[in-house]
Image (cartoon, helix red, strand yellow):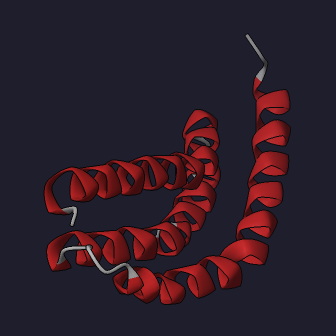
Amino acid sequence: MINKKKQRVLSKALGLATTMFYLLILPFLFAIAFCSIMVFDKPNLSSPIGLAIIIIFFCMPLSIFPAIYFIWSNYSKKRYRRVCFFCVLPFLIFTTAMLTIVVLERVNDLFFSL
């Protein structure tokens, strides 16, 4: 088991690194989310599935704000394991969102193909 000082230093370094990374990619994720409206260019895409894909794309950049808040609020409360979890949380949301989008497109192709 890691002692408290090493765990504190590790979680602070991880928190700083992920906060800087998330702030750097945030504009690009918002640009991708705003471009997700082009999903309706696909002629056989149903409206509910298209709206679901757009909402999922907007969940990715919007998950960064609470993650950064929870990283530093848990660090100040000395809950270092939670800091590590909230550093990874946007990556988990991004992965889940991408897999959900792939599944929604497959469902759309299966039921609404021309």
The residue under the point 43% across, 77% down is 58
Compared to residue 74, the image places residue 51 above or below, namely below
Q: How many labels does the image show?
A: 0
Q: Which of 78 and 29 is in front in this view?
A: 29
The residue under the point 37% across, 78% down is 42
Q: Residue furthest front?
A: 114
Where on the picture, by quarter, is residue 45? bottom left
Q: Nearer the viewer, residue 52 or 5?
A: 52
Q: Where is residue 32 in the image (x, y as percent from the top left)?
A: 58, 80
The residue under the point 53% across, 73% down is 61
Q: Which of 104 and 21 is in front in this view?
A: 104
Q: Position of residue 1 (x, y in %)?
A: 73, 10
The residue under the point 85% across, 29% down is 6
Q: Is residue 49 shown left or right of residue 28? A: left
Q: Residue furthest top?
A: 1
Q: Where is residue 114 in the image (x, y as percent from the top left)?
A: 21, 66
Q: Is residue 82 shown left or right of residue 2? A: left
Q: Is residue 103 shown left or right of residue 76? A: left
Compared to residue 48, the image places residue 38 above or below, namely below
Q: Nearer the viewer, residue 73 or 42?
A: 42
